[in-house]
Image (cartoon, helix red, strand yellow):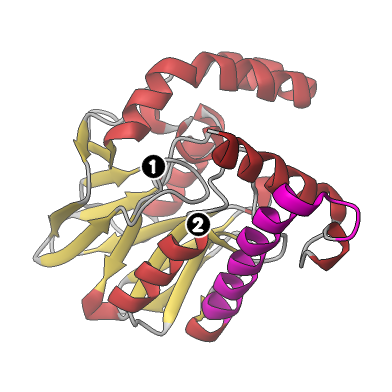
Amino acid sequence: MNEQWQEVGEQVFVRRHESFDMNTGLIVGDGHCLVLDTRTSHEEAADLVAAVRRITAAPWTVVNSHSHFDHYFGNAIFRPAEIWGHVRCAEEIELHGELQRANVIERLPERRAELEEVTIVPPDHTFAVTAGLDVGGRMVHLRHFGLGHSSNDVVVHVPDAGVVFAGDLIEEGAPPAFSDSYPLDWPDTVAAMLMEMPEPVVVPGHGAVVDRAYALAQQADLALVAELAKRAHVEGLRDVIKLFPYPENVSQQAIARAFMQLDA
C-alpha cells in the first residue's frame, strides 16, 4: 500500500496505512494543524510524525476518534500537545488500556516488544457532545452523535473543506467491526451524522475515502442489522441469520452485542 497523503479537501489530508488498513487525518491551518488518531505504537506514531512533517512544520493538536488501541496507542509521541477525545474515551482508556495491550499482544505476539514500549496516554481535553477547535484560523467541529461502533465515537467535521472524518462509524474494505459496538443505536447515530453534516467527502476509520452515497448505503445495512437482531431475539437465529448483510462471523458478533443491549 502506498502510504502517502491524499488531499481530500483544501489542506485536508488522509493517510491510509497498511497496518490495520487504518486512516489518519491531517488538517492544516495557518501556523497550526490537527492530527486525527495516532496509530498502534510508538514506532507507528513516529512514522506518522515524519509524514506530518513532510506537509507542515506547524505545532499540532491531536484528536482521538475513539478508545480502540489502533487509534491512540501512539499518543505519547505527540506530547506535549493537547489530546482531545470524548469523555468516555478518556475513561475507557484509563480503565481498559492495559487490557487492550494484553489482548493485542496475544493476537500479535510478533509485535510484543513494539507494543510493550507503548506508554498509554488518554485524552486530556474531553467533551460530551460537541466541541469547536480553532486550527490556525479554521474552525473544526468535534461531535459525538451517540452510541455506535463504540461508546465514544467522535466525528471530525471540516466544513470549509467539505470533509467529514467519520472514524469507525463508517468502514470501507471490510464489514463494520461490532466487537465493542451498540448495534441497536449505530444506525441512528450514523443517520444523525449524515443529516447534520451533508458534506460530499466521508473519511472512514479504515479503507478508502468514500462519498455520501456509500455512507447512506452503509447506514441502511446497519439499520437492517438492528432490525434483524431484534427479530432474532424473538424468533431465534436459525431462519434470520441468513438475511444479515454481513458474513456469518460478523453477524454473530453483531447479534451478541445487540442481545446484550436487549437483555439489559
For the residue labelled by badge 1, is the local secondary structure a helix, a strand or a loop?
Answer: loop
Q: Main secondary structure of the magenta part?
A: helix
Q: Amino acid at mark 1?
A: Asn
Residue wearing tag 1? 152
Say left or right for 164 vs 260.
Answer: left
Q: Against 168, is 102 above or below? A: above
Circle 2: element type: helix
Extreme-right residue of the structure: 238
Residue 119 visible (yes or no): no
Residue 186 - label: 2
| Point 23% across, 45% down: residue | 61
Q: CA distance from mark 2 to mark 1?
A: 12 Å
CB under 8 Å between callouts 2 and 1? Answer: no
What residue range appears in magenta?
Answer: 214-239
Quadrant position of the N terminus in the picture: bottom right
Q: How many marks?
A: 2
Q: Earlier in the sequence, mark 2 or mark 1?
A: 1
The residue under the point 66% across, 61% down is 225
Is residue 231 a member of the stretch shown in magenta?
yes
User: Which label belongs to residue 122?
Assistant: none
Q: Position of residue 27 (x, y in %)?
A: 30, 62
Where residue 92 sits: x, y (%)? 41, 25
